[in-house]
Image (spheres, rainbow, N blue to C red):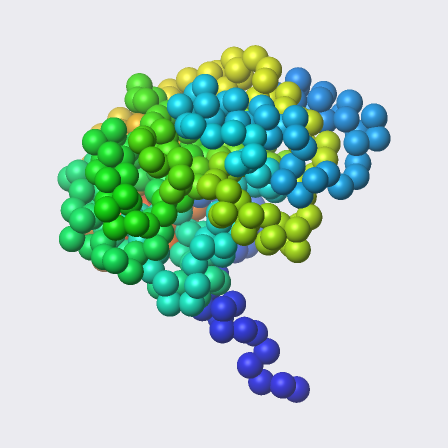
Amino acid sequence: MRKNILSNRVNFIKDSATLRLNDIGEQLRSKGADIINLSVGEPDFDTPKFIKDAAKKALDNGDTHYTPSLGKPRLRKVVAEKLKKDNNIDTSYENIIISAGAKHLIYMAINSIIDEGEEVVLLSPAWVSYEACVKIAGGRINWIKTNIEDQFQPTDIQDNINKKTKLIVLNSPNNPSGAVYSENTLKMIADLSIDYDFFVLSDEIYEKIIYDSKHISIASFDQMADRTITVNGLSKSYAMTGWRIGYASAPKIILDGMLKIQQHSISCAPSFVQEAAISAMSGPQDCVNEMVSEFKKRRDFLVDGLNSIGLRCLLPKGAFYLFVDISDFAEDANEFSEKMLKEGYLVMTPGDAFGPGFENYIRISYAVPIDKLKEAVKRIGNIIA
Ligand SMILES: Cc1ncc(COP(=O)(O)O)c(C=O)c1O
């Protein structure tokens, strides 16, 4: 049998961080343990009925075949209108590509731009898949750490940017920190992008899950639509993670690159799901507001609950995670998470999954019903008391 079966590209990628703890959790659950999973990355709500109905209708109408690789023209138009109206982005139908989720769009964008050895700036803490996508492309990561003292807003980026930087990945509202980047922060990054001539990949998947704050798209700043790939999707806003549908607006040359990868990988996003997306984006938005107000209640409860038992965390402005400093209670987050799992039957994500500098943090998801969150706070309190 041949040695070196797996490619270096694959060998360089780490396993998903939550996998090991989830495995232990599943073993304990099979023995009857009452596991509470606080590592979930998806809304625990059902997809709204009117969206499901649109998909059913499309299926009944025989909408079960390939669509153009860029996506259905009607959906691309709805997306372009949305980006103009909600996000103030100067884009058009020709700049829109639809795909099977934001993740695949991020994968395609990075692989379209980055060659072997080229530099990508990631701001830690960062969602786990950016690192993997850059490594698959052969790129080099320049990690820039953000800090809890600055509410996880990037500040001293300038000293770490150089002429080799080709791309920076932004994610606001942020997974895992919950930070929402301010207008000043985004303006500072936009100015650097123009001065140093690098591109911006702006992952805005949590755009609508935001509390008492305003989401700003960096592509809305002067000259930035020509140097930004704005990625978004329906997974989080409409509780549609399993449907696999997302969209991006990109400069034409990058869009053409992404299109080539899409043509030779997944061909197109599922046809009837594209109809569901048209309906979700053009229909009543009360479902989004209801979900966000429930998340807000949970966030407030959990932050108060954790602070009251001595676990320090900020009140996040967006997404549905808390990023919690556990340095007063354990050597590192892996040790802390393992203890929480074995003694409290709680699954959490250790901070080292999100890049360097957060070995003493854990991510707790509140995409979990409030009665379970109450129970979780009680259990954590008992363990760390
Ligand atoms: C920051 C971030 N970007 C992108 C995604 C992927 O979204 P999608 O389901 O549209 O692929 C996730 C999912 O967890 C995420 O947290």
Q: Say whether residue 51 is left or right of residue 377.
A: right
Residue 27 pos. (x, y %): 55, 54
Seen at 66% across and 86% down, the residue is 1
Q: Which quadrant is home to the C terminus?
A: top left
Residue 110 vertical position relative to residue 230 in the rendered view, above or below:
below
- Residue 295, horizontal then vertical, whole percent: 42, 24
- Residue depicted at 20% across the width and 55% down the height: 160
Question: Is any atom of residue 194 visible in this view?
Answer: yes
Viewer-proximal residue, 260 or 375?
Answer: 260
Whether residue 351 sits left or right of residue 256 in the image: it is left
> Residue 143's spot in the image, x, y percent?
28, 56
Residue 352 visible somewhere in the drawing: no
- In the rendered view, tell whether residue 347 sits above or below residue 14: above
Task: Answer left or right for 73 relative to 225.
Answer: right
What residue lies at 21% left-to-right and 31% top-to-bottom? 184
Q: Against 120, is 61 above or below?
A: above
Residue at image position (67%, 33%) is 72
